[in-house]
Image (cartoon, helix red, strand yellow):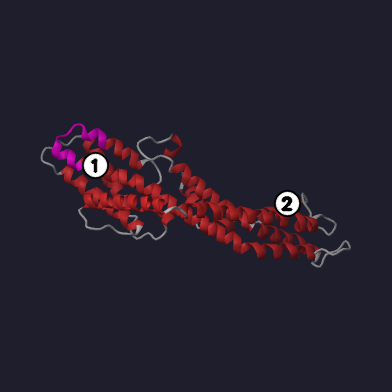
Amino acid sequence: MNKLSKWVLIDGNRLLVSALLVSMSFLITLWLTQLGLITFQPASAVSSMFSSGVVSGIFSLVTITLTVNQLVLSRVFGTVNDLTDRLDGTREFRRTVEGIAGRATSPNDPAAFLALIGETLGKRARAFEEHDSMETTEEIDDYLSGIHSYAERLEGVGGTEDTMEIVSTLLGPAYAQRLTETDAIRRTHDDRATEELDAVAELLEAVAVARQFFKTIAIQQDLAQLSRRLAYLGIPILLVAFYATTVYTTVPSATVAQPLLPVVISAAIAIVLLPLAILLSYMLRLATIARYTVSVGPFVPPEERT
């Protein structure tokens, strides 16, 4: 995935991506009117299109908004036992990382927590590298280089305030590759050196769990934000659709000068498409995140490696 596609699909601000989609629809519609392929003249069916088709489409988006709300709420609700199990599992996971890092506590902030894993991963790799029984080979050098590079990548997440940006950093099969390499190296070294490699393996497993957990949080936040934005846009878009129909009078004429009709109606169409553009921008991100974070462990599908 190149930088441009990654920005459009994941990293870019969703409102900005939506604005780009809307701008493209405006320019394409205006271009088609200039070519004469479509027309917005008074005798056209624009008025009926806005009064019936657009309104029904907006109400369909309201239904989608309700469905999105149900998806978000289904993850929030739970029995006392379910919520207790979730809490216990999270606390146990944190204690595992704290034990390896030699810390009494770990940060509550997801970015700082991942940075702690990265810092500890680098320390454990250096401890293994400095072990007196460790013989340096090209395989070991490549392995340590990969571990240190990945540890720096995790440490670089520190200070990030956007959960989705954290998830974006964790995309790809790097953790699974490092885990497989660690298992291979671990089989060839004595018990004392293996202790450090065991810690490295546990930290990489912690990254796999954290990636899925933070992905869940980020998707819930995105769905909640999508639902709210679609709800905000409902009435304004209905008003735009209503105002677009008033441009056309009962006689074959319009309240706007005919040379300006293509611009006015193209803009109205673009504005009416805004909720759909926002929905599309969010769905693209959620689908991409789901595609590239499917695996939890050493089995990585080919699609996730690209």
- Number of numbered callouts drawn: 2
Q: Nearer the viewer, residue 28 or 129?
A: 129
Q: Residue at horizontal 54%, vertical 48%?
A: 284
Residue lying at the far left of the rendered structure: 132
> What stretch of residues is rendered in magenta?
182-196
> Would you identify the image quadrant in which residue 227 lies?
bottom right
- Is residue 188 visible in the rendered image? The answer is yes
Which residue is pictured at 14% across the width and 36% down the height? Answer: 191
Q: Quadrant of residue 16?
A: bottom right
Kind of residue at disc 2: Leu
Label located before the other in sequence (1 or 2): 2
Please tell me whether mark 1 sits on a helix, a strand or a loop. Answer: helix
Q: Write down the residue under mark 1.
A: 144
Q: Residue 28, image x and y in percent? A: 68, 52
Q: Is residue 89 magenta?
A: no
In the rendered structure, does residue 192 fall within the stretch colored magenta?
Answer: yes
Camera-side residue: 59 or 239? 59
Q: Is residue 188 above or below residue 239?
A: above
Badge number at residue 32: 2
* Mark 1 burial class by Cα count in 10 Å: few <14, some 14-19, many 20+: many
Judge the density around disc 2: few (<14), some (14-19), many (≥20) Cα neighbours within 10 Å.
few
